[in-house]
Image: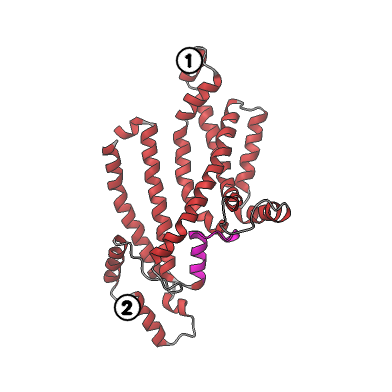
Amino acid sequence: MTAFLLRRLAQTVPIALLVATLVFSLIHLIPGDPVEMMLGEGAQRSQVEALRHDLGLDRPLATQYLSFLTGLVRADLGMSLHFREPVIEILVRHYPATLELTLASMVVALLVSIPLGVLAASHRNRFLDHVSRVVALVGVSIPNFWLGPMLILLFAIQLDWFPVSGRTGWLSLVLPAVTLGTALSGILTRMVRSSVAEELEKPYMMAALARGLRRGSVLRIHALKNASIPVVTIIGLQFGALLTGAIITETIFSWPGLGRLVIQAIRLRDYPLVQGSILAIALTYLVINLITDVVYAMLDPRIRVS
């Protein structure tokens, strides 16, 4: 297991370097002069040159890139133009809120999808299976930017059960987590249903039932575990989708996370903060993929050997 982990870490390093390079390249790929975009068309030439010098954009490209990588190793992502404080400190302050919302959304999706998917697989082409298909289709079809305001109108304004916005306690987490986790629950329900149904057709499952084992125990101990690898794949891939989807959800609920921070930074034309926020989201997605591979190896020892 240690050798597998070290091998995956070694493979992750060049990918992380590529991600950092792509984020650095944003400043050179976007059309127009980013400094003039940040200051506006009415800015004086001296102001433009001063800001370009402060950002280091008047230096050769290779020097800028080397300075960017050096700062990244030291956790130095520059200074925010609007907040006048280090970008890394702003990210550290907002990152826990996004991580909290993403994990809560994942919990909501798993609590819905695993029981519903297993029930659908064990009652194929019957009433519960049809119900699971409808729930999955509805969950995937409803967009976050519609579901969020509807939940606010019903549960926050009409019923007054939850706060309308902000991060004031666990109650304020419920509506954003449900909004963000609904679509994922639909995807995971279909995946759990198909994976468990496939396992139920295999000979070892029939042999276990023939030996007199209870169907519920066989489903829980054998089928669900063996069907978990494709489900873990979807969870790992969709975690990045939750991070990007959090941009809309955090804006709707005024959740003080990275997603809302990205929108604020773009609106304020705070280039260092935009770059740092995107880099934090991208590297988080990379780490989640690494964790997914480790979970693979724990679930299936053959992966460690291959």
Residue 167 sits in quarter: bottom right
Residue 45 placement (x, y as % from top left): 41, 87
- Considering the whole magenta stretch, tell me its main secondary structure: helix
Residue tagged by mark 2?
58
Q: Name the N-terminal-most of marks 2 and 1.
A: 2
With 181 as the anchor, is 306 left or right in this view?
Answer: left
Q: For the residue marked with disc 2, what is the amino acid?
A: Asp
Residue tagged by mark 1?
207
Quadrant assignment for the N terminus:
top left
Magenta residue check for 288: no
Q: Residues within 10 Å of mark 2 (few under 14, many from 20)?
A: some
Residue 270 placement (x, y as % from top left): 45, 71
Number of numbered markers: 2
Q: For the residue marked with disc 1, what is the amino acid?
A: Ala
- Using the rendered image of the protein, determine whether residue 298 is visible from the camera's viewpoint: yes
Residue 7 placement (x, y as % from top left): 27, 42
- Using the rendered image of the protein, determine whether residue 306 is visible from the camera's viewpoint: no
Residue that lies at the very extreme toward the right in this rendered image: 158
State the residue at coordinates (61%, 52%): 143
Q: How crowded is mark 1: few (under 14 residues within 10 Å), some or many (20 or more)?
A: few
Q: Check the image and report above or below for 22 versus 237.
A: below
Q: Residues in magenta?
A: 251-267
Quadrant assignment for the C terminus:
top left
State the residue at coordinates (48%, 22%): 202
Residue 107, numbered label = none
